[in-house]
Amino acid sequence: MDFTKTTLGIEFGSTRIKAVLLDENNVPAAQGSHEWENRLVNGVWTYTMDDIHAGLQACFADLKRDVQQRFGQPLTTVGAMGVSGMMHGYLPFDKDGRPLCEFRTWRNTMTGEAAEKLTNLLDFNIPQRWSIAHLYQAMLNGEEHLARLHHINTLAGYIHERLTGACCVGTGEASGIFPIDSNTLDYNRAMMDKFDGLIAETGYAWRLRDVLPKAVSAGECAGTLTEEGALLLDPTGEFKPGVPFCPAEGDAGTGMTATNSVRPRTGNVSAGTSDFAMVVVEKMPKVHREIDMVTTPDGNPVAMVHCNNCTSDINAWVSLLCEFARLMGKDVEKGAAYTALFQKAMEGEKDGGGLMAFNYLSGEGVTDLDEGRPLFVRRPDAAMDLATFMRTHIMSALATLKIGMDILTKEEKVRIDRLYAHGGFFKTPEVGQTMLSAAVKTPVSVMETAGEGGPYGMALLAGYMLNRHVGESLPDYLDRAVFGSARSVTLMAGEADIAGFDAFTERYKAALAVEKAAIAAVKGA
């Protein structure tokens, strides 16, 4: 294989770091992965720097092994590459590149005061997980590290900076740091001026533009792999420097790219540890606390419903059921257990019967909760069967997303022509797809490449930089070079499924008082 014609995407997901290598026809040729998990340390959801560096190297080493096995050649270069990761969060550094505090991930809900004040100041919804909310909360808290602040970054931006030496991120990733002006493809200047007024009140010497990573649009070159970066990526020294990098993106931007959802009136839903919906809109909606406004990698406005919690509680229950199976002498493979339990859920009561579940492992901005307590409750007279139990947990995983999507489609009248789904939630054929369709009342499609996910989308963005025609837009490139003959399966939920999910959601919203009481009564660690 001629590896100079390949493209590589590496994505830092919540539970797995994954690399996908595409051939010159944008077909996956090899992959690597490494599992990791966030930690709750002193009340902060984080990954250590050792976690990040070791995870990057382990994932890349696994990719190299796969390439060697498949092609009998060592992987020493690629045509272009890019890095993506969980959006948002807060990584501050001093002038020597040393971290000033722990990495505060998107999962933290510690910035409520800052998010509310910034939303009012800017007349633009600023969610708690955005980098600017973390920065301002640190200012409100008077954290000592701000006096030494040189710049901040996201996880993807940090890895990109370590590999290339360039402190920049893609436009889509930048839109989760601070609001982007889709006309200039840069941070909104008027809003930055307002934030600088807040900085002036505190007496810090830096200004906002000084500390934010540069925003770079899709298709532009954002640096090349340095010698130091090559050794960080591959300590064996086999992989050579000089590879061009496209701008680092967030998992939202790679999800949009991987599902060809970058044109207005297209959208996608990614569902795994967290879930989020991205809909490319034709006009800006009103300010809603439940709706985030970000952009595509090439700068089009996107309405985003982001939920911190999706499958974590389901994962815990499946592990418990597998443990019971082992106790009874049956060694059940976990993947097979997921498939069987998801399929069984389709036999359950369509509104969950008298069962109710909250999947909140952590706080949830859409429903205004700063903490979470996974919770299962049922009426005394409710039937406690496995099918309805599983269906309840699957609907719970999507309920918060539905609450936000209902605002977009009912209140803002946003039109969606195509909605694509991807992520681990949809691995079992038809089940997650049908349940999502019931939640959002629109047909849902799953592409044959959906399982490749974010790193696949990142590799496609690297290919756009490497192979696009002069003046060719990102949507046109994806249609021409990638998805022209792509196959997908589209499903529309039946009326009974839709009515059942609506009824469940109304009970879910009413029962939020129970979740709030659990948070107050069951103290965290």
Image: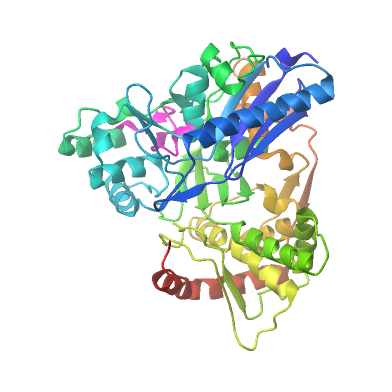
* Drawn side of residue 23 relative to residue 82, left or right: right
- Please determine whether, in this image, residue 201 is positioned above or below residue 403: above
For residue 469, what is the image quadrant?
top right
276 and 479: which is toward the camera: 276
Question: Which quadrant: the C terminus?
Answer: bottom left
Q: Position of residue 409 (x, y in %)?
A: 55, 57
369 and 470: which is toward the camera: 369
- Please determine whether, in this image, residue 56 is positioned above or below residue 392: above
* Drawn side of residue 336 relative to residue 321, left or right: right
Question: Which quadrant: the N terminus?
Answer: top right
* Drawn side of residue 64 relative to residue 405, left or right: right
> Which residues are drawn in magenta?
171-189
Q: Position of residue 12 (x, y in %)?
A: 58, 37
Q: Position of residue 420 (x, y in %)?
A: 68, 46
Q: Residue furthest bottom?
A: 381
- Please determine whether, in this image, residue 132 is positioned above or below residue 408: above
At x 71%, y 38%, the residue is 452
Q: Position of residue 485 (x, y in %)?
A: 80, 33
**Residue 166, can we see it?**
yes
231 and 364: which is toward the camera: 231
Say if the magenta span includes residue 178: yes
- Please determine whether, in this image, residue 161 is positioned above or below residue 484: above
Say if the magenta span includes residue 187: yes
For residue 210, what is the image quadrant?
top left
At x 66%, y 22%, the residue is 463
At x 32%, y 40%, the residue is 135
